[in-house]
Amino acid sequence: MLVMPLTTSFRFVHEPLQGDDDALPMLGNASLVEGLRSRIIHSHGGAFLVTGFRGVGKTTLVLRALNELSQGDEDDLVVPVVLSVARSTDIDRLLFAVTRRVFESLHDRGLLSRLPADVQQSLLVAYMRTSLAFKQTRSEATERGVNVEASNGRIVKVPLPKVVTTTKRTRSLATEAQFLAYSETDVEHDIIRIVSLLRRSGSVTVPLPRWRRWLQPWSKPTKARIRLVVVLDEADKLTSADAGLEVIEKILGGVKNVLTMPGVHFLVVAGPDLHDHAIRDAARGNSIYESVFGWRLYVPCSWSAVDRLLDVVRADTTEYPAELKQFRDYLQFKARGIPRRLLQEFNGFVSWAESGPTLHVQEHDAKRVQFYANLEVLLSEHLEQEQQRRDQLFSADIDEDRRKLSAYYVVDWVLRSEGEPFSSKDLVPEGEPRHFDPALGISEPGVARLLEHLQRHQIIEYVRRSNATATIIGDANDAIFKLSSEIRRALFGFAAANEAERAALQISALADGGTSTGAGGAALPPVRVLANRYELREAIGRGGMGTVYRGFDRQLQRAIAVKTLGYFDRDDPGALVRFRREADIAAQLRHPQIVRTYDAVDIDEGGVAIIMELMLGSDLASVVAESGALPPDEVVQIGRRLASALSYLNEKRIARIDLKPSNIVMEPRRGPVIVDFGIARQEGRGNITAAGQLVGTPMYMAPETISGGTPDHRSDIYSLGLVLYFCATGKVPWESASVALLLSKRLQEDIDTSTLPVPARLRDVIATATRREPDDRFQNAAELDAALAATSEST
C-alpha cells in the first residue's frame, strides 16, 4: 500500500493549461511551445498545421504559445481567435464565424474602440452583415420576417443598425433575401480588407501598467501593432471520417486566399490522419495542403510525462520507494504518453485531508496496480525488441508514437476478449479496420509478434498453433490464442471492484448467467447461457470452423460440449453457411465412433450453437505424444473402428471430414471417437468452397484435395492411412517441412512405408490407403477394414 504526501500547491487539473501553473507545469513538449511562438513572432502570417494524437496536448501547446506571445513584445498585441471545427461546416459559415469572432475578440479586449475610425467601420459593417445573414437564414426556416431599422444606439462611436424580428408573415421574402445576401466572396473580401487595414494602420495605444505610472510618471503610453492568430481547433474530430476529410479539403481550397494572406496566422489543430494525408498529398504533386500550410508541427506523445509529474508533485523528493516505482509503471501503462489520460488516472488516487493532498493506493487497488505495472514491464520488453528490429535511421516521432500506441491498444483489446479465442487476423481483419483507429497504422505481422510475446509470458495461451496440423480454409492457418484463465479471473476481479475498470474492460455479467464465487469467496467470470438451458463455461478448443466450450445442461444436469461459430467469424457469410451445414450434418449421425449431437439452438443474430456430448479422454495426438508409437495390434484396432465410422459416413454420402489425430478422442470405453465435422461436405448439398480454395489439414490432406479436385470417400481413406502411419511411428511423413513443401511433396511422391516398424501386411495396408491416385487406394472403407482384419494383429 502506497501513501505519499503531495506538495501543498497541488490541485486537480481538468482543463488545458494556458500558462505556467505552480500546481502543474507542462508535462512535455515545452520546446515545441517556444518553436510555435518563434514561428509566429518572426513571420508576418500564414497557415500552420498542428497535429498529434488525441489527448497529447495540442490545444494546451497552442494556448501556452499564445499566452506567452500576449505577455511578450510590447510592440505587438496578439489577439487569439479560437473556433472549434469539430462539426461539419461549409465555407460560408466558417468565414462568417471568423469575422464575428475577430470583432468580438477585439471588442472584449477593449481594443476595438482604440482602432482608427476606418478600421472600426469596416469591422462593424462586416460584423453586422454576417449578423443579418444569419437572421435571414433563420427567417426562411421559421417563416418570420426580418426588418432593419436605423437606431441612435452607438457602439464604438459609429452608428449601429438595430435588428428587429417580427412575428408577422412577410410577402417579400425574396426581396429581403436579395437585400441581405452576403456570399462567401463578400465575406472573404471583408476579411482580407480588415486584415490589411489592421496590418497597415491597426496600431493601438497601450495604457501603461499602474505600477509603471506610479514609478515612472514621465513615461508615455506606447503604440502596439495588433497581430491576429486564428485557431481552428478540434479538426481531428471532423477528419476521423472520410466525409470530414472531404469537408476540410473543400474548405482549404475555398479559403486559400484568406489562410495564406499576410497579417494573420491560422493554426489548424488536427489529428495524425491529416498529418499523413498532407504528406501523401504533397508527394503526388499539386497539393492543396502544400499550397496552404507554410509549416507543419507534429506534437508527439509525452513518454516521460509520468516521471515529470511524480518529480513535481512529490513533497518528499528522495529516491523512489519500491511501491512508487510500481505505481509509476502502472501510470505509464494507463497513460501511454497521453497527458490527459495520465492526469485522469493520477487524480483518481488523490485525496484531501487537513494536512493537504495525499496520493493513496489503497489495499483493494494494490493488486490491480501491480497487475498493470507488470504488464508495462512486459510491454516495454517487447517494444525494446521491436526497436532493435527496425531501421531507426529514418524513424520520426509519429512513427515512434504509432509503434508504442499500437502495442498498448492491442493489449487492451486482448484484455477485453473475455476468453474468446482469436488470431492476429481477428484483430486486424482485411478491409476496413473494425477495432482500431486507422491512424495507428496497426499491422498484422506486428500484432502476431506481440501475441507471441504475450503467450510466452502466460498472459494468453495457445488454443491452436500455426502449423501443418491445423485446419485451414483458404489461406487461413493462423495461431489461435485465448486469454489465460488466471488472467481472466484477475481481470474480472478488478472489474467487480472498480467501476472504471469494468467500463475499460467492457466486462458485463450476461443477463441470464450471473456470477459465481470460487475458493475464498473470489468472484469468478460470468457464465453465458444459451436458450435458458445450456451454460458456456470456458473455451477448450478452436478449429477451422468454430470454438468449443465446456458447458453444462441445466435441464438434464450433465456436462456437455458446446460449439459455436468463432466470435470474430460471425460477420463472414460463408463461415455462417458452413457452420449451419455442420450442425445439419452432425444432427443426422448416430454411431459409437462419432461424437453424438444432442441439439442445435439459434443464438445471437442468425447464429447457431451445436450441443454435443462432452468426450472424456485425451485426443489421439496427445496420447501418441505422451506414450510414443502404439503397438501394431492397437494400431489395427483403431484403424478398424475408424473404418467402421467411415463406412457409416459413406452411406450418408458424407466426405472430407478432416480426419486427423487431434480430431479423434480416445474415449476409455468406446475407443477412438471422431469429434469434428466442421468442413464435412454431403453429396446433394451446394458447394460452399470457392474454386481454388484449399480446405482441410495440410498434414493429412489427400493429393486430389490439394490439387483442387473434388474430395470423396477415398480422400478420407487417405487421411485414415496417414493417421495409422502416425500411430505406428509417432510422426507423419515430411512433418518437418514447411506447409508449401509438404503440399508439393504430397503431390509428387508416394509415401514410403517400407521402414514402418510394423508387420509387412500392416505396412501394405497403410501403403495402399495412402496411394497418390484415388483409383489405386481402397475404394471404400469396407475394403480397408477387411484388409486390416486379415492382418495377424487383428486377432
Image (cartoon, rainbow, N blue to C red):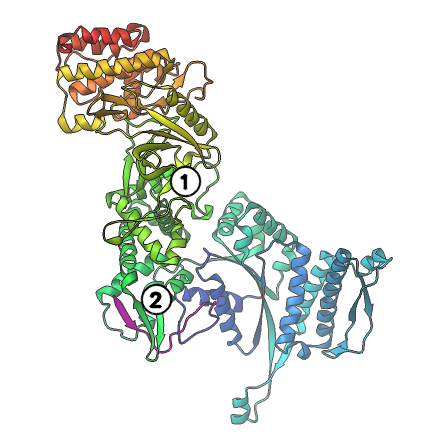
Residue 15, magenta (yes or no): yes
Q: Give the camera-side residue of 663 and 384.
A: 663
Residue hosting label 2: 349
For disc 2, the neighbor class at 10 Å (few under 14, some 14 to 19, many from 20) is: some
The relative height of residue 478 versus residue 777 in the rendered view (above or below) is below
Residue hosting label 1: 428
- Identity, as a three-letter code, of the amino acid under mark 1: Val
Whether residue 421 is visible to the viewer of this picture, yes or no, is no
The quarter of the displayed image where residue 301 is located: bottom left
Query: Which SS class for mark 1?
Result: loop
Magenta-highlighted residues = 1-16
Query: Which SS class for mark 2?
Result: loop
Principal SS element in the magenta part?
loop
Residue 606, magenta (yes or no): no
Q: Give the camera-side residue of 297 and 197.
A: 297
- Identity, as a three-letter code, of the amino acid under mark 2: Phe
Q: Residue at x 30, y 55 (%)?
A: 372
**Mark 1 and mark 2: span between their CA atoms?**
35 Å
